[in-house]
Image (spheres, helix red, strand yellow):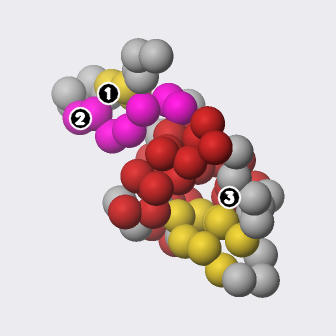
């Protein structure tokens, strides 16, 4: 599966559409369970500082993740 990237007029490529969609989903509703098919995306987003795992609520977006969502918002 080829991952597509979000490219901007300044030439900056911030993250794939797939990562951004997952990040948006976990920002809106944290989850304690992650499907095996997207675990590699969660691992990458966590390593990049966009997601964190909390014992009470599960995986959710960090402040940096929320900033990235806002930066990628279609205007």
Q: Which residue is mark 2?
A: 12
Q: Residue furthest left?
A: 11
> From this viewpoint, is residue 67 visible?
no
Q: Position of residue 10 (x, y in %)?
A: 21, 30
Q: Earlier in the sequence, mark 3 or mark 2?
A: 2
Q: Position of residue 16 (x, y in %)?
A: 42, 32
- The front one of 38 and 28 is 38
Q: Which residue is mark 1?
A: 8
Residue at x 23% of width, y 35% of height: 12
Q: CA distance from mark 3 to mark 1?
A: 22 Å
Whether residues under marks 1 and 2 lie with C-beta atoms below 8 angstroms apart, the answer is yes
Residue at x 72% of width, y 71% of height: 58
Q: CA distance from mark 1 to mark 2?
A: 6 Å
Please tell me how crowded label 2 is: few (under 14), some (14-19), or many (20+) other residues with Cα within 10 Å.
Answer: few
Q: What is the magenta range? A: 12-18
Circle count: 3
Q: Position of residue 19 (x, y in %)?
A: 50, 40
54 lies above or below 40: below
Residue at x 71% of width, y 83% of height: 55
Q: Is residue 65 within the magenta segment?
A: no
Q: Which residue is mark 3?
A: 27
Tell which tag, 3 or 2, sits nearer the viewer: 3
């Amino acid at each position: 599966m080829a991952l597509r990237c979000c490219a901007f007029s300044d030439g900056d490529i911030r993250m794939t559409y797939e990562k951004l969609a997952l990040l948006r989903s976990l920002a809106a509703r944290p989850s304690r369970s992650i499907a095996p098919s997207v675990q590699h995306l969660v691992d990458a987003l966590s390593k990049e500082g966009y997601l964190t795992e909390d014992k009470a609520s599960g995986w959710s977006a960090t402040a940096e993740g929320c900033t990235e969502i806002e930066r990628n918002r279609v205007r």
